[in-house]
Image (spheres, rainbow, N blue to C red):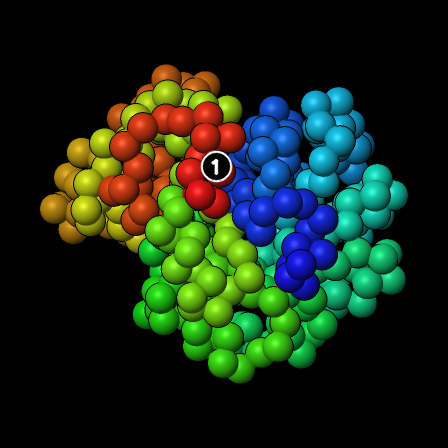
């Protein structure tokens, strides 16, 4: 059994990529029930009681292991970690921020921490800070990116593998058995999958979001800078975004986007976060079917 699988305690070395704004106990449980590692996304949560409630809801649906992602810019992490450890969560991922201060706390609580890195230098720093494993995310991935020039999964994973000894999880551009197998060839012990699970039957994403993923073609996503122009997010280029790009108004997109289309009904200006792998996703499948095909 690989070091990563020992850490996760599940059957397959597949981690559900956390999606910051979503916490669906149903989806987390579906991933864990199918043998992979379901993940709660706690990056934007401030109330530890809410964390406890989410864990209880997942536990009602599965007795299999699952984890959680915390973002290191969240000032409430110490309390959240206490709840996670108290509930018996064994391995978590940490992202968006410096891992230096939090790793001694994670270890003191008896947990393993897997730090999410987008660049080679981050990987070296995270291992020095005590990360037990790394999720290495290539530039094709969905989610938050930097505005720097970045390497793809194909380049970044072997580059990091050549320089660190901790287990690696490849992320970015993995949706099926081909990507899964490639990750091992690149030096990873497992994968983290975001966009493919977003376009699943159990995903809480709006139907419009899932449809945008399955209709997305080659080159159909782009990096859109955030309001403060310090980070970027990979998003599906909808007709509204395309128009903004043609009008050279890219820097206004983040400010004018509708972040809560389910509440406003304004899907025209919605931000459908997704990775380049959307071009390969052509159907909405149950999570179990996605995982079974991936490991086949
Ligand atoms: C809409 C969206 C939100 C995300 N939110 C988070 C998050 O809160 N924390 C995190 O570590 N990663 C986040 N990610 C990254 C995913 O967990 C995962 O690493 C990434 O999607 C993998 O690449 P793929 O989309 O090609 O599978 C997010 C990705 C997307 C598409």
As displayed, is residue 16 above or below residue 115? above
Q: Quadrant of the C terminus?
A: top left
Relative depth, front residue between 227 and 38: 38
Instruction: Write the residue at 53% across / 36% down.
Output: 21
Is 87 displayed left or right of 140 in the figure?
A: right
Is 116 displayed left or right of 72 in the figure?
A: left
As displayed, is residue 255 above or below residue 28? below
The percent position of residue 84, horizontal first and vertical second, equals: 79, 44
The percent position of residue 98, horizontal first and vertical second, equals: 63, 67
Instruction: Write the residue at 69% across / 51% down.
Output: 8
As displayed, is residue 142 above or below residue 29? below
Instruction: Write the residue at 58% across / 51% down.
Output: 13
The percent position of residue 204, horizontal first and vertical second, equals: 50, 25
* Mark 1 lies on residue: 292
Can you tell which quarter of the image residue 215 is in?
top left
The percent position of residue 250, horizontal first and vertical second, equals: 24, 50
Q: Given the current orientation, which residue lies at the most extreme bottom position?
A: 163
Can you tell which quarter of the image residue 103 is in?
bottom right
Relative depth, front residue between 173 and 273: 173
Determine if residue 90 is in view: yes
Is 79 displayed left or right of 234 in the figure?
A: right
Instruction: Write the residue at 30% across / 37% down.
Output: 281
Q: Categorize mark 1 by other alpha carbons within 10 Å: few (<14), some (14-19), many (20+).
A: some
Determine if residue 96 is in view: no
Q: How many marks?
A: 1
Q: Quadrant of the N terminus?
A: bottom right
Looking at the rendered structure, the secondary structure element under dot 1 is: helix
Q: Given the current orientation, which residue lies at the most extreme left position?
A: 246
Q: Is mark 1 within 8 Å of ligand 1?
A: no
As displayed, is residue 139 above or below residue 263? below
């Amino acid at each position: 059994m690989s070091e990563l699988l020992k850490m996760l305690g599940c059957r397959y070395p597949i981690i559900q990529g956390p999606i910051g704004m979503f916490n669906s106990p149903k989806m987390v449980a579906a991933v864990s029930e199918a043998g992979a590692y379901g993940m709660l996304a706690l990056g934007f949560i401030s109330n530890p009681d809410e964390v406890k409630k989410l864990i209880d809801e997942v536990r009602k649906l599965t007795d299999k292991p699952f984890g959680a992602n915390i973002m290191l810019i969240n000032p409430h992490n110490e309390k959240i970690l206490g709840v996670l450890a108290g509930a018996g969560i064994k391995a978590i991922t940490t992202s968006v921020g410096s891992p230096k201060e939090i790793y001694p706390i994670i270890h003191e609580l008896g947990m393993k921490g897997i730090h999410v890195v987008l660049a080679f230098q981050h990987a070296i720093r995270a291992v020095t800070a005590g990360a037990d494993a790394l999720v290495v995310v290539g530039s094709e991935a969905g989610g938050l990116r930097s505005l720097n020039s970045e390497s793809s999964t194909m380049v970044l994973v072997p580059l990091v593998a050549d320089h660190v000894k901790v287990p690696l999880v490849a992320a970015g551009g993995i949706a099926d058995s081909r990507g899964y197998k490639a990750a091992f060839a690149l030096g990873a012990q497992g994968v983290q999958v975001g966009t493919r699970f977003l376009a699943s039957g159990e995903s809480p994403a709006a139907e419009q979001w899932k449809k945008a993923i399955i209709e997305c073609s080659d080159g159909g996503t782009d990096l859109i800078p955030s309001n403060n122009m310090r980070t970027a997010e990979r998003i599906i280029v909808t007709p509204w975004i395309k128009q903004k790009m043609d009008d050279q108004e890219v820097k206004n997109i983040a400010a004018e986007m509708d972040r809560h289309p389910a509440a406003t009904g304004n899907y025209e200006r919605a931000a459908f976060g997704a990775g380049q792998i959307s071009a390969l996703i052509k159907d909405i499948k149950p999570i179990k079917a996605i995982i079974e095909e991936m490991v086949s």
